[in-house]
Image (cartoon, rainbow, N blue to C red):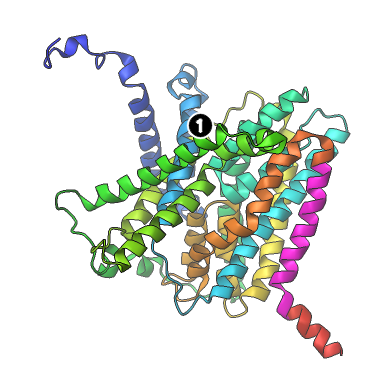
Amino acid sequence: MTILDVSVMTFDRPEAWQWLVQFCILATALLLGNLLRTNIPFLKKSLLPSALLGGLLLLVFKAFPGCRELINKPMMEIVTYHTLGLGFVALALKNNKIESKSTPMKVIETGALTASTYVIQGIVGLIVSILFFLLGKKFFYAAGLLLPMGYGQGPGQALNIGKIYTGWAAQQGIDFAGADFGLSIAAMGFIVGSLIGVIYMNILRRRGKLSQKKIEEAQVNKLEDYEGKGEIPDAESIDKLSVQICMVLFVYFLVYLFTNWIQGMDLGNFGTNTLKPLLWGFNFLLGTLFGILFKTILNRFKKAKVVRREYINNYMLNRIGGFCFDIMIVAGTAAISFDEFGKFMLPFAIICALGALVTFVYVLWISKHLYPDYKYEGFFSMFGMLTGTASNGMILLREIDPKFETPAANNLVLQALAAVVLGFPVLLLVGIAPQSLTSTWITLGVLVVFWAALTVFMLRTKIFKRKAKKE
C-alpha cells in the first residue's frame, strides 16, 4: 500500500467517523442552545446555561423515531466522564493568588460551606431513599447520595458514582439505573439553580434590596486578563494554546497512570471493595491534586531559574475549563435515558424538591453570617454553584455584581482546594454507604455529625460571642 492509496485505508468507512460525528452533534447542540438563549427573551431572563439547553434539545431529538440511534449513549457518558476530569485539571493549573478582598480564612470558610452543603444534601437524599426502601418500593437505599453528586458536583460525578451504585444495587437484587438517576438530578440542579435564583433575585429587586446594574460592564476583558508578565509568546515554535492543552493532557495522563498503578496493588478488603472502584470515579479529584503538584513543581523550577518563562496562562486555562464543562453538560444531559425513569419518578421528584429547598435555606442562612457585608452576592454565587457548576454561580453573581467588586467571586474560585480537603470524608462515605443497609445507616449518622461540626466551625464567632455575653 502506498501513502496515496487511501482507498485501502479505513477513512471511507463509517467507523472512522463515529466519534467525530458525536462531537459534531455536541457542538451543534451547544450552538443551537446558545442561539435559543440569545434570541428568546424568556430563556435569556431565566439564565439557564446554553449547554443545558443544548443537552435538552438532544433529549427532544432522541424522542423522534429513528433519531435515537444517532446519539451514542455510551459515548456521551465517556465524554461526560473525561471532560469533568480535564476541566478540573485546567482549573487546578491556574496560578490563583488570594487578593486583598479575600482573606485566607474566608476562603477556608467558603470551602467549609461547600462541603457542609454536600453533606446536608446527602442527609436529605439518604433519608428519602432509605424511607422508600423500607416501604418496600424496591428503591436502592443509598441512591440519595447521588443528590450531592448531581447538585453539588454536576453531571460528571453524578454519572461516575451512579454507575458504581448500579453495580452495588445489582448485588442486592435491586434494579437501579444509577447513571440515569444521577444525570437526571444534575440536569434538574441546573434548572433549580437558574430559575429559583432568578425568581429570588427579582423578589429582592422589587423589595428594593438589590440595585439593577448592567452585565455588559463585566464582559469587557482587559489586556492583563489575556496575558501575564513574562509569559511565553502566543506563537513561537509552539502555539501558547497548544502548550496549555498539552499540560492539561499530561497531568490527566498522570492521573491515569497513578489510578492504574493503584488498581494492581493489594489494599486489603477495604481497598479492594471501596477505594479501588471509587478511584476511577474520582478522576476529577486526582486531577486537581496532580494539577496542583505539577503547578507547584513548575513554579519551583521558575524560582530556581531553571525555567525562565511563565508557561501557565490563566485566561487560556479558563477557556479550556469552560469548554470542557460546556461539553460535559451537553453530553451528560444527552446521555439521560427515560427507559427506567418511571421506576424512580416519585423518589426523584421528592429528593430534588427537598434538596432544592434545603440548599436554598441553608446557603442563605450561612451566607448572612459568613458574608455580612455582601450576603446576597455570597448567596447567589454559592447557591448557583451548589446546584449547578461554578459557572452558574458566576452567572448569578454577575447579575448583581457585574464588576466583581465584592469578594464573592474570589471566594468562589479559591475555595476549591479547601472544599476538596474538607469534603474528602464525604467522598469516602459515598463508597461505603452502598455496601449494605447497615453501612448506609452508619453513613447517615456520620454525615449528621460531620455537618454539625462544619456548621459550628463556620458560626464559631457568633457562638462564642453569645457565650461571652451571657457570662
Residue 274 drawn above or below residue 66: below
Which residue appears at 82% of the width and 89% of the height?
A: 469
251 and 135: which is toward the camera: 251
233 and 348: which is toward the camera: 233
Give the quarter of the image for residue 3. top left
Q: Which residue is mark 1?
A: 77
What segment is highlighted magenta in the picture?
440-461
Q: Residue furthest front?
A: 266
Residue 229 percent coordinates (x, y): 25, 69
Main secondary structure along the magenta-highlighted residues? helix
Count all numbered tags in the image, as a single digit.
1
Which residue appears at 83% of the width and 34% of the height?
A: 133
Which residue appears at 88% of the width and 35% of the height?
A: 134
Q: Is residue 51 visible?
A: no
Residue 387 percent coordinates (x, y): 60, 52
Which image quadrant: the C terminus? bottom right
Which residue appears at 59% of the width and 68% of the height?
A: 108
Q: Amino acid at mark 1?
A: Glu
Left or right: 29 with respect to 235? right
